[in-house]
Amino acid sequence: MRRIYPSATREELLEAFPRRSMGQIYDCAARYNVKRKKEPHSTAGFPIIEQIKLRAKKCNISMKDLDAMARTTPYFASGRWRFDGLNRRSVYRAIEALDGEVTIVWR
């Protein structure tokens, strides 16, 4: 369980434990405190949001705290860019709050 559970797909788990349901496999993993590897978060096609999230993670700042620092309401914590599109003001405020700068490079 400890070896296979963190990175195996659902199908691999069911194959490795043929007489168990997924619910039983999840319960067993929880009992032994075995965690799944986390998938990287999706940014819905905005690389700048990914960079902001990576910088915040590196600085141990949650998305809720970033919203408070940048005065962006729950823009980052709720993932509003996925539904409303990219809000430039919120992005610029977050970059400033994370001690970054925006530059333009012409090709």
Image (cartoon, rainbow, N blue to C red):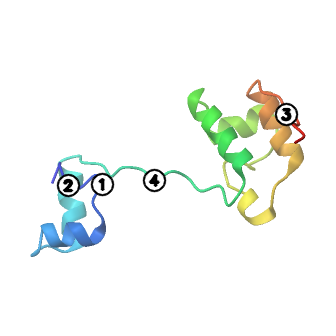
| Residue 102 versus residue 13 in the image, above or below | above
- Circle number at residue 4: 2
Q: Which residue is mark 1?
A: 7
Q: Amino acid at mark 4?
A: Glu
- Circle number at residue 102: 3
Q: Amino acid at mark 2?
A: Ile
* Disc 3 + disc 4, Cβ < 8 Å: no
Q: Amino acid at mark 3?
A: Val
Q: How many marks?
A: 4
- Residue at x 86%, y 33% (from the top left corner): 103
Earlier in the chain: of badge 1 and badge 3, it is 1
**Are there few (<14), some (14-19), or many (20+) residues within 10 Å of tag 1?**
some
**Are there few (<14), some (14-19), or many (20+) residues within 10 Å of tag 2?**
few
Task: Examine the image and state in which quarter residue 78 appears.
Answer: bottom right
Residue 59, position as x, y percentages in the image: 60, 26
* Image position of 33 (left or right of 58): left
Earlier in the chain: of badge 3 and badge 4, it is 4
Quarter of the figure with the N terminus: bottom left
Residue 21, position as x, y percentages in the image: 19, 74
Q: CA distance from mark 2 to mark 1?
A: 6 Å
Residue 41, position as x, y percentages in the image: 55, 52
Q: CA distance from mark 3 to mark 4?
A: 28 Å
Earlier in the chain: of badge 2 and badge 4, it is 2
Q: Which residue is mark 4?
A: 39
* Image position of 22 (left or right of 88): left
Q: Amino acid at mark 1?
A: Ser
Earlier in the chain: of badge 3 and badge 2, it is 2
Say which element carries label 3: loop
